[in-house]
Image: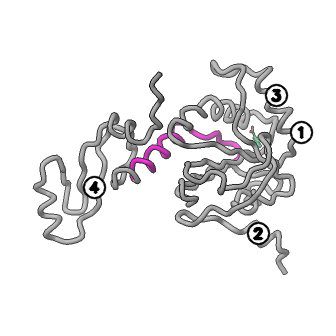
Amino acid sequence: MESAKEKWVNVMPRIGEPAPSFKAVTTQGEIDFPKQYAGKWVILFSHPADFTPVCTSEFMTFATMAPQFAEANCELVGLSVDGLYSHIAWLRTIKEKIEYRGMKNVEVKFPLIEDIKMDVSSLYGMIQPGESSTKAVRAVFYIDPKGIIRTIMYYPLSTGRNFDELYRTLIALQTADAFSVATPADWRPGDEVIVPTAGSCGVAKKRMSTKGIKCYDWFFCTKKLSKEKIFSTILKKKKKK
Ligand code: BEZ
């Protein structure tokens, strides 16, 4: 018979569903997730362990890029199954001692959840026993301003994440929402975007002859969308002094 905890370990959140809620202790005090992030995007990510090299390289990069994510109305929340004092000591070591790829004196200002009992990591399918039953895998959850999970990424313990891709995915999601479009393979802001497939033959024909829309076939049409238009729409406006 499966124990309650074993059952829980098998729970996997899904795209399009509300982010499971929890309260937890973090390096920045208690958080009520995702409630306190309502109205903002939030990326909840896990790392396997404090005081390990891949995680250190990732944390330094997350912290360095945090202002760039914040400008796109997106907060960061980290998690590992380590305790609070370990988190505090590790983040202090990063700030005081580690210089890596031009990053130094890096202060991690976003919350890092302590999850010794694996409550939150189990709830989010971050404990994947085939990879490790004592550490969380490298999970990334994108949660939108309404608290809905919009993208999930899982990486194994050995592979550090690609931060260009993490940021690109956020901008692609926000672009899809703001302009009712989709983004093709390897899309980057400024590349053509995909206009939704036409519902009927007549609409498709009309669309194929619409100026500014390029159709490869009736089901595959693109249009230009400038980088400037995207960023002026989705980035938080900086206050003029
Ligand atoms: C790392 O971050 O370097 C790491 C953590 C756990 C297992 C393997 C590597």
State left or right for residue 208 relative to residue 146: left
Q: Characterize the local packing of mark 3: few (<14), some (14-19) or many (20 or more) Cα atoms within 10 angstroms.
A: some
State left or right for residue 193 relative to residue 125: left
- Look at mark 3 in the image and give the residue it sits on: 92
Q: Is residue 166 magenta?
A: yes
What is the quadrant of the N terminus in the image? bottom right
Cα separation between marks 1 and 4: 50 Å
Query: Residue 8's spot in the image, x, y percent?
Result: 76, 69
Is tag 1's residue or tag 3's residue first in the polypeptide sequence? Answer: 1
- Look at mark 4 in the image and give the residue it sits on: 195
Residue closest to the far bottom = 1
State yes or no: discs 1 and 3 in contact (Cβ < 8 Å): no
Q: Characterize the local packing of mark 1: few (<14), some (14-19) or many (20 or more) Cα atoms within 10 angstroms.
A: few
- Give the residue at x 63% y 64%: 13
Cα separation between marks 2 and 3: 33 Å
Residue type at numbered disc 2: Trp
- Look at mark 2 in the image and give the residue it sits on: 8
Q: Quadrant of ligand 1?
A: top right
